[in-house]
Image (cartoon, rainbow, N blue to C red):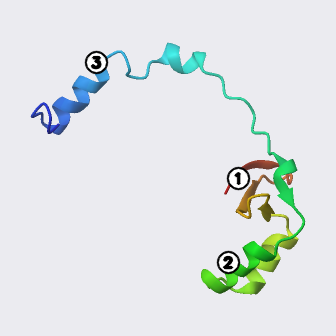
Amino acid sequence: MSYYDLTFPDAVKRVNEHEYAPTKARAAAVEKEPFKYPKYFEVTNTENIKDYLVNERKIDSRVVDWCMKKDLLVQEKKDNAVFKWKNAQGEVIGADR
């Protein structure tokens, strides 16, 4: 908008008219693969993430323990916390690190 001195509607129209605008054909061609959770990155020691979440982020230790008990929170090899997303069947369908 600033570079070409366009109004918002004109900028949107210009973007939509160019080749990089989404089309039904292009969207149909892109198939999403199912999420594959890399469980091999997990470690059994969870001291680092528990210490960080409880002492630094001030999350109640009962909440952290509950998430770990339900396998919703794990520690990975680089000491990051991984929050798993699970569906009603308990399958991991996504995760945030």
Crowd around label 2: few <14 · some 14–19 · many ≥20 (10 Å): some
Crowd around label 3: few <14 · some 14–19 · many ≥20 (10 Å): few
Looking at the image, tell me whether mark 1 or mark 3 is earlier in sequence order: 3
Crowd around label 1: few <14 · some 14–19 · many ≥20 (10 Å): some
Q: Is residue 60 above or below residue 87?
A: below
Identify the residue position indicated by label 1 in the image.
95
Q: Is residue 23 left or right of residue 84?
A: left
Instruction: Give the residue displayed 13% in from the left and 37% down from the top.
Output: 7
Q: Position of residue 44 (x, y in %)?
A: 90, 65
**Amino acid type shown at disc 3:** Glu
Q: Quadrant of residue 6?
A: top left
Could you tell me which secondary element the residue under label 2 belongs to? helix
Task: Name the image quarter holding the C terminus.
Answer: bottom right
Q: Is residue 24 above or below residue 96?
A: above
Looking at the image, tell me whether mark 2 or mark 1 is earlier in sequence order: 2
Task: Name the image quarter holding the N terminus.
Answer: top left
**Amino acid type shown at disc 1:** Ala
Instruction: Give the residue displayed 59% in from the left and 15% down from the top.
Output: 29
Identify the residue position indicated by label 3 in the image.
17
**Amino acid type shown at disc 2:** Leu
CA distance for labels 2 and 1: 17 Å
Instruction: Give the residue displayed 79% in from the left and 64% down from the top.
Output: 75
Q: Quadrant of residue 68?
A: bottom right
Q: Is residue 17 above or below residue 51?
A: above
CA distance for labels 1 and 3: 35 Å
Q: Which numbered mark, 1 or 3, is in the foreground of this view? A: 1
Identify the residue position indicated by label 2 in the image.
53
Q: Is residue 44 left or right of residue 49?
A: right
Q: Quadrant of residue 20?
A: top left
